[in-house]
């Protein structure tokens, strides 16, 4: 079945079973590899993307549920040359260790910051509750999210 998806502001006509998880379409069809396959059960957050500005687990979201909706992946936020504030803050604060969970964390954080650029530690922790990380950079991740929020609010990096 043909499904039309809007991913990173581009329209894609995909031929897939309507129940196919979005993650498989992103990685296999569109070659967007930031969202990772972690558990396949919606329990680890490595596959998090944004759908209409909300964090969503792409491994358990069927493509048929996304018609007429806007999907944003980490690749849609910024580039190597011009990273989005959340990407730049994670780099600046050295918030990534292995990096496997980081794209999902950045997308959960981006969804939060778009609504609230000055979240409390509690609000950040709540937004990241579905994102699991074993690396131990949690305090740097919190600092990076606060830094990105500051940049998003003021528009200044310094």
Image: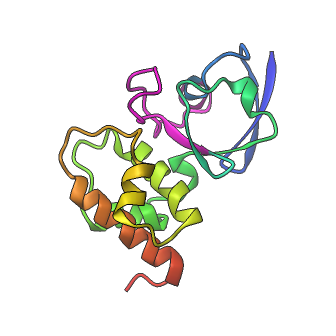
- Quadrant position of residue 26: top right
Q: Position of residue 56 (x, y in %)?
A: 57, 39
Residue sitting at x 29%, y 68%: 92
Colouring convention used in this rendered image of the protein: rainbow
In the rendered image, the residue lying farthest to the left is 136
Q: Quadrant of the C terminus?
A: bottom left
Residue sitting at x 21%, y 52%: 137
Residue sitting at x 41%, y 35%: 46
In the rendered image, the residue lying farthest to the front is 122
In this view, the residue in front, 87 or 146, is: 146
Q: Position of residue 28 (x, y in %)?
A: 56, 24
Looking at the image, residue 44 sits to the left or right of residue 117; the answer is left
Query: Quick check: is 21 in the magenta stretch?
Result: no
Looking at the image, residue 14 sits to the left or right of residue 47; the answer is right
In this view, the residue in front, 2 or 129, is: 129
Is residue 155 in view?
no
In this view, the residue in front, 69 or 98, is: 69
Question: Which secondary structure is most common in the magenta stretch?
Answer: loop
Q: Which residues are magenta?
A: 25-50
Compared with residue 99, is residue 3 higher up or lower down, i.e. above or below?
above
- Quadrant position of residue 119: bottom left
Is residue 103 in view?
yes
Q: Position of residue 129 (x, y in %)?
A: 39, 43
Q: How many marks?
A: 0
Query: Quick check: is 41 in the magenta stretch?
Result: yes
Q: Position of residue 125 (x, y in %)?
A: 36, 53
Looking at the image, residue 14 sits to the left or right of residue 113; the answer is right
Compared with residue 148, is residue 4 higher up or lower down, i.e. above or below?
above
């Amino acid at each position: 079945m043909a499904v039309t998806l809007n991913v990173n502001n581009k329209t894609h006509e995909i031929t897939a079973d309507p129940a196919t998880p979005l993650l498989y379409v992103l990685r296999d069809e569109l070659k967007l590899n930031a969202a990772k396959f972690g558990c396949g059960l919606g329990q680890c957050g490595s596959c998090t993307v944004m759908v209409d500005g909300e964090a969503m687990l792409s491994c358990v979201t069927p493509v048929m549920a996304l018609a007429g909706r806007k999907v944003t992946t980490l690749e849609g936020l910024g580039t190597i040359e011009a990273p989005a504030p959340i990407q730049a803050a994670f780099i600046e604060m050295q918030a990534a260790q292995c990096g496997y969970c980081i794209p999902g964390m950045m997308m959960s954080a981006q969804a939060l910051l778009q609504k609230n650029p000055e979240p409390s530690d509690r609000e950040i922790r709540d937004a990241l509750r579905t994102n699991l990380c074993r690396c131990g950079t949690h305090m740097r991740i919190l600092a990076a999210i606060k830094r990105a929020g500051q940049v998003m609010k003021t528009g200044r990096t310094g």
